Image: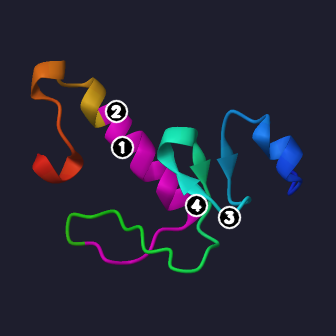
Amino acid sequence: MRSRDPKILDDCDIVVDVGGVYDDSKKRYDHHQRGFTETLGFGFNTNLSSAGLIFKYAFTFLSLSSISDSKAGTMEER
């Protein structure tokens, strides 16, 4: 679905590239806000696009799911 209507976006499971919010816990992946500075890490300092935010989420999810919970940590810790 494509919409910028906040009422419609509130009902979506995942929102990408609209809404003015980056919040991984709420599955909101927009990079169009002042002060946005999210990067991939690992020495990469370029601000991420919405696609980059999805990649970072997927990379983290897949990396963490491939190790046991007792060894889980942030990407920077590994």
Q: The magenta stretch spans which residues?
A: 44-62
Kindly report the distance in space between the C-alpha atoms of the residues bearing marks 3 and 2: 26 Å
Residue identifier under label 4: 50
Q: Residues within 10 Å of mark 3 (few under 14, many from 20)?
A: some
- Name the foreground residue: 55 vs 36: 36
Task: Say what secondary structure mark 4 lies in.
Answer: helix
Residue 61 is covered by the magenta coloring: yes
The residue that label 1 is drawn on is 59
Amino acid identity at mark 1: Phe
Distance from label 1 to label 3 (Cα)?
23 Å
- Judging by the rendered image, the residue that carries numbered circle 2 is 62
User: Where is mark 3, residue-wise?
Assistant: 20
Find out whether residue 35 is within the magenta segment. no
User: Residues at badges 2 and 1 in contact (C-beta under 8 Å)?
Assistant: yes
Which quadrant of the figure has residue 60? top left
Asked if residue 38 lies left or right of residue 44, the reply is right
Side of 49 where 10 appears, left or right:
right
